[in-house]
Image (cartoon, helix red, strand yellow):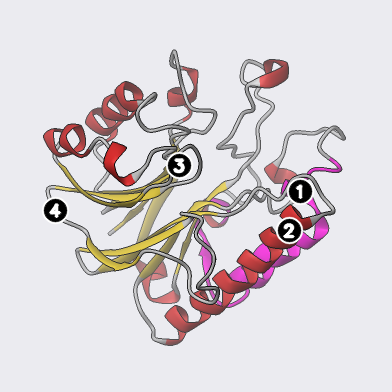
């Protein structure tokens, strides 16, 4: 079972790239982020023709998350993160596919920091940890997939000082991610590639893709009951090099 996460950075603008990747990579489940489309603008027909069922929660202009399932219909279990009923940002969706619960997470960026946007990021992270804790205590097979907007350690960003003030690598951001993992989640890409600089995001500015000046922001965390099923994991880097590409590449895992 191949499960992927992909920040598409505008699903309608990148639809040809997404369909090309779906056909080539054949993931069984895909968590998408940053749809940048309202519910009615989601390209459901094109996704269905590609062989995928889908659930989504869109948002005009920004945010938006979805879960796709190959030759199956995802069973929606939650379309928002609990803990703050007034929060209307479309950043979390959760569905069951073939006996596994999969999320699509689009965690707030948090810039500029310090300030209200960074406070919102940390508060959202705390809510995610509370919900993740309830999932792990139920001993469920769960994959927390998504764009966390955190490069967890120094090896998850190219050698540079230019991002030192960015919310993506602040000590509080990294501590929040570490506290989540400490609940018992396995950070699969780091677990299988402990010493490798694995990147999933390359900013459009400053020639960062050709220079391989990347960050690992997209993560797949699996619950303890899935660890024995873990086979492999990777990043489809070449997708980032296509014309009109998202600034992210798909990250994926394979479960036996």
Mark positioned earlier in the residue sequence (3 or 2): 2
> Residue 35: x and y, percent?
41, 40
Residue at 25% x, 35% y: name it. Answer: 43
Mark positioned earlier in the residue sequence (1 or 2): 1
Q: Which residue is mark 4?
A: 72
SS of the residue under disc 1: helix
Residue 26 visible, this angle: yes
Mark positioned earlier in the residue sequence (2 or 4): 4
Along the viewing direction, whichever of 154 and 208 lies nearer the viewer: 208
> Residue 22: x and y, percent?
27, 33
Is 130 situated above or below 31?
A: below
Compared across the picture, whether 116 is left or right of 214 comes to: right
* Alpha-carbon span between mark 2 and mark 4: 36 Å
Disc 4 crowd rating (10 Å Cα; few below 14, some 14-19, many 20+) is some
Q: Which residue is mark 2?
A: 173
Q: Which residue is mark 1?
A: 167
In the image, which disc is placed on residue 32?
none
Residue at 83% x, 32% y: name it. Answer: 160
Compared across the picture, whether 5 is left or right of 181 comes to: left
> Residue 162: x and y, percent?
85, 32
* Alpha-carbon span between mark 1 and mark 2: 7 Å
Q: Is residue 172 magenta?
A: yes
Q: Which residues are magenta?
A: 164-190
């Amino acid at each position: 079972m191949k499960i992927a996460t992909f920040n598409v950075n505008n699903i309608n603008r990148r639809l040809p790239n997404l369909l090309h990747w779906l056909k080539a990579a054949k993931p069984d489940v895909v968590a998408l982020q940053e749809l940048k489309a309202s519910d009615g603008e989601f390209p459901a027909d094109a996704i269905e023709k590609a062989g995928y069922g889908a659930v989504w929660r869109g948002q005009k202009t920004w945010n938006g998350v979805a879960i796709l399932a190959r030759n199956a219909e995802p069973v929606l279990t939650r379309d928002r993160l609990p803990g703050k009923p007034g929060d209307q940002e479309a950043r979390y969706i959760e569905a069951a596919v073939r006996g596994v619960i999969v999320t699509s997470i689009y965690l707030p960026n948090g810039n500029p920091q310090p300030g209200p946007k960074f406070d919102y990021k940390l508060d959202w992270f705390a809510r995610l940890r509370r919900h993740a804790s309830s999932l792990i205590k139920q001993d469920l097979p769960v994959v927390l997939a998504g764009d966390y907007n955190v490069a967890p350690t120094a090896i998850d960003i190219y050698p540079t000082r230019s991002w030192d003030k960015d919310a993506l690598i602040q000590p509080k951001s990294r501590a929040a991610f570490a506290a989540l993992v400490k609940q018992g989640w396995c950070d699969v890409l780091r677990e299988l590639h402990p010493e490798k600089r694995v990147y999933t995001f390359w900013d459009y500015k400053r020639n960062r893709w050709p220079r391989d000046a990347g960050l690992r922001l997209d993560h797949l965390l699996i619950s303890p009951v899935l660890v024995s099923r873990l086979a492999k994991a990777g990043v489809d880097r070449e997708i980032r090099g296509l014309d009109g590409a998202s600034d992210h590449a798909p990250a994926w895992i394979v479960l036996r």
